[in-house]
């Protein structure tokens, strides 16, 4: 009998199901089209059980190791049934919600996200606070059993498609140290006082938004953790962002590498050492990420070591698209293709989820102990 908590058996059964099930995306490359397809895929996966494995039973899951989720992400995104951006929000936000939300709130909300009924967004960055997240100024003030929020977030991916936001705010007074003055809330995006304004990126997609909070009332029951737990929540989120979430992005990059090899061969060019270098970068990244998944599965607490995964991911992604640009002269500059959009988006890989410079600082100071200067 198949034991679906065993990764190899799980993957085999999932592949057989995906082969049978037609989840081919429609020919709609807009962000709205991607979000609709993502919801469709999530619903099918959830209803068939696949999207519930690797999540705890008390939050609507079917249990089993987190690695099962990585397998679902790899198969779904690697087959291009869903785009990696929307898919990534699942792995970034759900584990944190499960760890920090009151149990009944997580039990109510997580299945809605897993089943594709809702999209959530991450309201961390602000116009003056990105790398230096501890300096956020969006303030939450307690008034009875409500908290009133005022301020602004920016670069909030998919906010215009989201029903909920995991939001970091400043609480405490002027004497409270920064790292104890941050509190997280689970906020309904349609709460009065919230305005969402999409921002157009250079790859011509309204992928992220400015989000304004003007006297927004949030019930105290929507706090994630306790007052002052927000910094720790943000730190706990990063290892998930850089493990199961990266695994599906790596599968996507491999699929684009295969497509690039196909384009190059189709043009009658030789598959040369430039492509070899890309393959090596992708393979190094995948080996590193595999080790990270296994450490997570063994119950290790992931920390600054995941900065290595982030640097490798950004480097491999940009090398892949730089090579595509070199090997397909003028395609990226002049033709309206996915290669152009993806090349432009790959420039963000050294920014999102922690910039390359900051990751290298972390590696040198915290892993190599090289001191502050
Ligand atoms: C595609 C994309 C999606 C995103 N989605 C979200 C989202 O959903 N939610 C969200 O909250 N945020 C999101 N962000 C924002 C992202 O987290 C920030 O852009 C990132 O943390 C960097 O912050 P910043 O843009 O304010 O740049 P800054 O922190 O102002 O950095 C500017 C430059 O200075 C460098 N720098 C800063 N500090 C140091 C230092 N100490 N040492 C050396 N160099 C330094 C940086 O490396 C960078 O080159 C997204 C960003 C992108 C690109």
Image (cartoon, grey):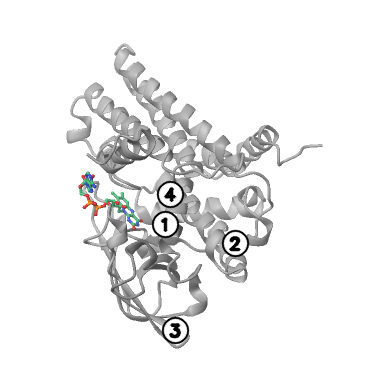
As helix, strand or loop, the secondary structure at mark 4 comes to helix
Going from N to C along the chain, the mark reached first, 4 or 2, is 2
- Can residue 155 be seen in the rendering of this structure? no
Check whether the beta carbons of the residues at disc 1 and disc 4 lie within 8 A of each other. yes
Check whether the beta carbons of the residues at disc 4 and disc 2 lie within 8 A of each other. no
Q: Nearer the viewer, residue 284 or 21?
A: 284
Mark sitting on residue 238: 4
Judge left or right: residue 76 versus residue 262.
Answer: right
Give the spatial CA distance, label 3 vs label 1.
Answer: 23 Å
As helix, strand or loop, the secondary structure at mark 3 comes to strand
Residue, disc 1: 234
Circle 2 Cα neighbour tier, 10 Å, few/some/many (<14 / 14–19 / ≥20)? many
Residue, disc 3: 146
Give the spatial CA distance, label 4 vs label 2.
Answer: 22 Å
Q: Nearer the viewer, mark 4 or mark 2?
A: 4
The quadrant the N terminus occupies is top right
Residue 125 at what x, y percent from top left?
Answer: 30, 59
- Mark 2 residue's CB less than 8 Å from ligand 1: no
Judge left or right: residue 37 versus residue 69.
Answer: left
Circle 1 Cα neighbour tier, 10 Å, few/some/many (<14 / 14–19 / ≥20)? some
Give the spatial CA distance, label 2 vs label 3.
Answer: 26 Å
Check whether the beta carbons of the residues at disc 3 and disc 1 lie within 8 A of each other. no
Q: Nearer the viewer, mark 1 or mark 2?
A: 1
Q: Residue at x 41, y 68 (%)?
A: 183
Going from N to C along the chain, the mark reached first, 1 or 2, is 2
């Amino acid at each position: 009998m198949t034991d679906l908590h065993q990764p190899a058996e799980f993957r085999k059964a999932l592949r057989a199901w995906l082969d049978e099930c037609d989840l081919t995306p429609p020919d709609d490359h807009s962000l709205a089209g991607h979000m609709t397809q993502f919801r469709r895929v999530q619903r099918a996966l959830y209803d068939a059980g696949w999207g519930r494995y690797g999540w705890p039973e008390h939050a609507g899951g079917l249990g089993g190791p987190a690695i099962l989720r990585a397998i679902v992400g790899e198969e779904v995104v690697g087959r291009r049934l869903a785009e990696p951006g929307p898919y990534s929000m699942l792995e970034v936000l759900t584990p944190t919600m499960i760890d920090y939300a009151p149990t009944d709130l997580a039990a109510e909300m997580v299945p809605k996200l897993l089943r594709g009924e809702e999209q959530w967004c991450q309201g961390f960055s602000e116009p003056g606070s990105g790398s230096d997240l501890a300096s956020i100024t969006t303030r939450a003030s307690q008034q009875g059993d409500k908290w009133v929020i005022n301020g602004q977030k920016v670069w909030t991916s998919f906010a215009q498609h989201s029903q909920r936001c995991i939001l970091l705010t400043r609480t405490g007074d002027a004497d409270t140290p920064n790292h104890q003055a941050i509190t997280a809330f689970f906020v309904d995006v349609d709460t009065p006082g919230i305005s969402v304004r999409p921002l157009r990126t250079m790859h011509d997609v309204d992928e992220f938004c400015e989000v304004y909070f003007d006297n927004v009332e949030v019930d105290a029951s929507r706090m994630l953790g306790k007052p002052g737990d927000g910094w720790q929540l943000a730190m706990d989120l990063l290892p998930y962002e850089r493990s199961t979430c990266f695994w599906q992005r790596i599968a996507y990059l491999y699929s684009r590498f295969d497509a690039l090899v196909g384009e190059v061969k189709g043009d009658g060019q030789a598959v040369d050492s430039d492509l070899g270098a890309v393959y090596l970068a992708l393979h190094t990244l995948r080996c590193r990420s595999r080790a990270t998944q296994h450490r997570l599965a063994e119950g290790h607490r992931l920390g600054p070591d995941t900065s290595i995964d982030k640097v490798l991911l950004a480097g491999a992604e940009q090398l892949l698209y730089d090579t595509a640009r070199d090997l397909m002269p003028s395609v990226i500059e002049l033709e309206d293709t996915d290669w152009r959009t993806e090349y432009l988006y790959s420039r963000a890989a050294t920014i999102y989820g922690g910039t390359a410079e900051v990751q290298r600082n972390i590696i040198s100071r915290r892993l190599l102990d090289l001191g502050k200067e």
